Image (cartoon, grey):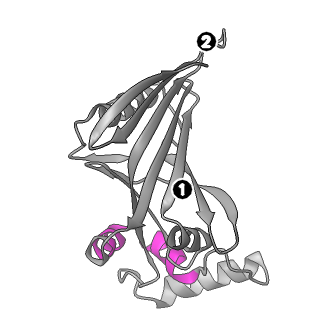
Amino acid sequence: MIKFNNLNKEIPFLLFKAKYDKAVDAGQKAIEAISISSFNKEISEVDSRYVNLKFITNDEFIFFSNYNSVKAASFNSHNQIAALVYWPSINVQIRIKAEIKKTSNEFNKKYFFDRSEEKNALAISSNQSKPIDSYNQVKENYNKSLNNDNLKKCPEFWGGYSFTPYYFEFWEGHESRLNKREVYEKSDNSWKHLVLQP
């Protein structure tokens, strides 16, 4: 589930929440899963991965990761991303374009402290995306961290990312392929509304 805090009252954010609530009511599984696509200038490569969206605070969408990961290198190289959710329970796709940045150390420490020790042990023990000899070694590193580390202290290499959308596309699928596509794009501090052809 996604936690909403003081949600921005502008139309695309309210529409996102309305679609989210409808998907929750329809029993959508893994509703917090969101695909993040990024571009790494250093290697001229686009990459995508799913993350768990934890919070939407005002106009910021927040998830957490390892700051030494492959996606972190992409965010450092190029701070514009694309995000995508698809909720099949209501046949809705939401496309987002945004700028991304790290959350504050204070925010990261508080969130890490409140998480389960099992999750924190994995965050501490894993050099995310880096090669390792075997999956058994992953488990050994995890168990070592679980039994020996301070599991309430947030490591410097772990924390949140927040992205602030400037573009939303709300896509609603229909059996007849007369799909409904509405765009909200921010320009000069106001949202321009467009309807796109299917």
Q: How many marks?
A: 2
Which label lies toward us, 2 or 1? 2
Of residues 20 and 179, the one nearer the viewer is: 179
Q: Can you give x and y, in whole percent of width and height, for residue 47 in the image? A: 67, 59
Is residue 198 toward the left or the right of residue 183 in the image? right
Which residue lies under the disc numbered 1? Answer: 51
Counting from the top left corner in percent of width and height, residue 162 is at 38, 60
Residue 111 sits inside the magenta stretch: yes
Task: Give 86 or 112, whichever is nearer the viewer.
Answer: 86
Do we see residue 1 in this rendering? no
Q: Would you place residue 190 above or below residue 174 in this image?
A: below
Q: Which residue is rendered at x = 38% and y = 27% of the image?
A: 193
**In percent of the image, x 47 and y 82: which residue is there?**
157
Give the numbered dot on residue 178.
2
Q: Residue at x 66, y 14 (%)?
A: 177
Q: Nearer the viewer, residue 23 or 142?
A: 23
